Amino acid sequence: MTRKINNSYELGQSNAPDTGGDMLKTRADGTLVWEGVADTTFVPFHFHNATNYGFSSGGHLDSGYSDVIQKFSFTSDGDATDIANVTVARRMPTGQSSSTYGYTSGGYTGARSNVIDKFSFTSGSDATDVGNLIQARHNPAGVSSSDNGYTAGGETSVVSNVIDKFSFSSDGNATDIGNLVNGTADSPAGASSSTYGYVFGGAAPSATDMISKFTFASDADATDVANLTQLKTFVSGHSSSDYGYRSGGSSGETTIDKFTFASDSDATAVGSLFLGRGRGAGTASSTYGYTAGGQDSGATRVNVIDKFSFASDSDATDVGNLLTIVASTAGTQY
């Protein structure tokens, strides 16, 4: 069903229409939706509409691990600020985003972690521990639907193929809902369309160029649908409304790939990062992809934040810095 959305009114504006058209409203569980006032048909909010901030949580410092949650603006270029802390300092976690909360799952604290933390995008409060993953692991991929967060792959004592999901509407443990292709995926990245989760790159067990996808509509295994332009580990992932993006990767890689959600087809190289690196946090506004922090070709950690346009295939530009020189953080967006 295709509908024209009237989005010229602010939420709660006194002269917003109360008959006909569509209005942005908030459900009881905090989910934002476009509501057809006349027919109460709902179009779910999805994080591709993020317009406010990107977040970077945890990470690997030059000395030890970080518990800091940093945020940087999508509306103006600039440095990140320290807004809160995750429950435990760790490197190599992954991130998921609901419409109101950021989640940091898994990672390495000195031992592999199964913790799922969540923090409010708006309150500036510290994260709380709200559940556990099926497996304690680091280096997984993070994916988000409108209703659930997904943690895919990673490393336990061996490389994991598990896809598990946890609910955004209620705090609780994750459940095992399927497997990645070929049984393994260590250090991949994730992207999300409105209907599918995508996992790509990483090691399976050696470096791979595979793009796999799994449906949000039912619990099922992923399928191999396409390839990146390179075999790369420690890549970053980004999502626009129509495309998934891979930026960077191990050994100081600069390439930015994109692949379409509309058809299962191989990625194309569309630009380069300002600074080549892997282990960066991938986030996305509705118009730009951002890569924050990471590790360059000399295995030196960096604090660079760069962004690239979704509207045109072009190179990224340096738009700010994280507070610390850090790699292997979790990225989320609001």
Image: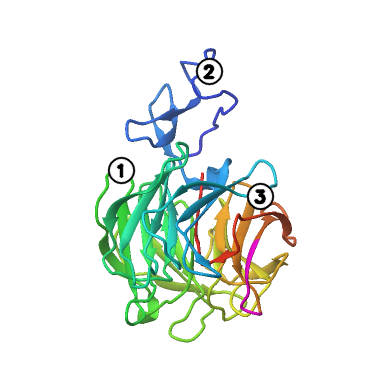
Q: Residue at x 31, y 60 (%)?
A: 115
**Image height of 170 relative to 264, above or below:** above
Which circle, 3 or 2, is nearer the viewer? Answer: 3
In the image, which residues are magenta? 298-303
Q: Residue at x 46, y 51 (%)?
A: 194
Q: Which residue is mark 1?
A: 169
Q: Which residue is mark 3?
A: 79
Q: Where, by quadrant of the figure, is residue 100 drawn?
A: top left
Say which amino acid is labelled 3: Asp
The residue furthest top is 15
Q: Residue at x 47, y 37 (%)?
A: 122
C-alpha distance separating marks 2 and 1: 27 Å
Decide which of 143, 91 is in the foreground and name it: 91
C-alpha distance separating marks 3 and 2: 32 Å
Q: Position of residue 18 (x, y in %)?
A: 46, 15
The residue furthest bottom is 206
Q: Is residue 76 left or right of residue 138?
A: right
Secondary structure under the numbered disc 1 in the rendered image: loop
